[in-house]
Image (tube, grey):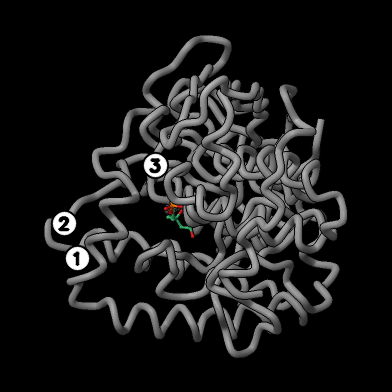
Amino acid sequence: MIEKDFILKNTDTDSLKNGSFTWQSPSNIALVKYWGKSEPQIPKNASISFTLNKCHTITTLEFSKREFPSNDFSIEVFFENKLNDEFKPKIEQFFKRIVKYLPFITEYNFIIKTENSFPHSSGIASSASGMSALALCLMSFEKHLNPSITETFFNQKASFLARLGSGSAARSIEGELIVWGEHPEIKNSSDLYGIKFPYPIHENFKNYHDTILLVDKGEKQVSSTVGHDLMHDHPFAHQRFEQAERNLSAMSKILQNGNLEAFVKLVESEALTLHAMMLTSDPYFILMKSNTLKIIGNIWEFRNKTKSNICFTLDAGANVHVLFPEIEKEKVNTFIISNLVPLCQNNQYICDKVGLGARPF
Ligand code: PMV
């Protein structure tokens, strides 16, 4: 698929006066990270993520035909049942980027009602699940206008649109492992949308667990938009993008051969490299908190003592994602509850695992 394949041809909207579509869409956690992009939301390197199961957004898109056509957008946003103008600029910007592909969006009044399964301002990125849920609602609209589109096209275009809202949202349509970004060793991979990891996944990675430790729920001092921008003049950018490409090759092999020891090393190295980019940008910044480091230290100690395959990864924030295989769940859960949860803000954590992707309501 190329960019122009996503431009909607059928623009006759007479059959749809008003109605609504609802989707539940998951968050995801990257194993090989995306950090750095060029216009329009094209990643500087390919990335891969586990789709999550419990952490999701549910979005309803209500629409009614406008009386008078206009070139601007008519959008109202409700977050957790309350009118919320905070999200409106981001959604308007998203609509501006996607109007070329969905020209009907200027013809309707939209009310977007959205809620997350995870606590509000928990520091868990809601942009991936939020933007993918909205993209899927818009694709349900398109499917109504154009019922012959295939499931593959539906998912690819949903991911393509979601990407234009938030890069990592491109990886939040399907499960269980999604690659976004063109990579020579990943068949059919694309910078434009995410694809399912196209090779058989080893048993060790089925039902993989991700317990998210909420270390700091405060507003991030530096948004990911700013962070991505800082990669433009970053002294290590080139090496980082090359390293990420190599790491994705290695990760692809690991996911197929089940080498947990290699998985642990690669996932942790990716997390620390992401934060190393932040530590070495101009201006530099630190998103980890002291308890982030204490948790990492405790995980390493436990792993050394017990030979567990537990490991951590980080998003652009202070929270820690603790990853471990299904067969270790009892012993690792006991450790998490006794040694790591006390380091979380208000003892808050979320037990999640790999999920299968978004679903309509
Ligand atoms: O999707 P964005 O623009 O919020 O970027 C998020 C990037 C990371 O979460 C830090 C890494 C990743 O690949 O998900």
Q: Secondary structure at mark 3?
A: helix
Type of amino acid at the residue the image marks with label 1: Thr
Q: Is residue 314 left or right of residue 325?
A: left
Q: Is residue 354 left or right of residue 304?
A: right
* 3 and 1 marks in contact (CB < 8 Å): no
Closest to the observer, 7 or 218: 7
Q: Nearer the viewer, mark 3 or mark 1?
A: 3
Q: Quadrant of residue 185?
A: bottom right
Q: Is residue 265 visible?
A: no
The percent position of residue 102, horizontal first and vertical second, equals: 59, 48
How far is disc 2 from disc 1 in space, using C-alphas? 6 Å
At a point 85% along the width and 68% down the height, the residue shown is 203
How far is disc 3 from disc 1 in space, using C-alphas? 30 Å
In the image, the residue with mark 2 has its CB under 8 Å from the nearest atom of ligand 1: no
Type of amino acid at the residue the image marks with label 3: Gln
Q: Residue furthest bottom?
A: 184
Type of amino acid at the residue the image marks with label 2: Tyr
For the C terminus, which image quadrant?
top right
Q: Is residue 166 visible?
A: yes
For the N terminus, which image quadrant?
bottom right
Q: Which mark sits nearer the N-terminus, 3 or 1? A: 3
> Residue 93 got which mark?
3
> Residue 280 got which mark?
1
Mark 1: few/some/many CA within 10 Å (<14, 14-19, 20+): some
> Residue 284 got which mark?
2
Mark 2: few/some/many CA within 10 Å (<14, 14-19, 20+): few
* 2 and 1 marks in contact (CB < 8 Å): yes
Quarter of the displayed picture in which ligand 1 can be seen: bottom left
The percent position of residue 10, horizontal first and vertical second, equals: 71, 52
Closest to the observer, 133 or 209: 133
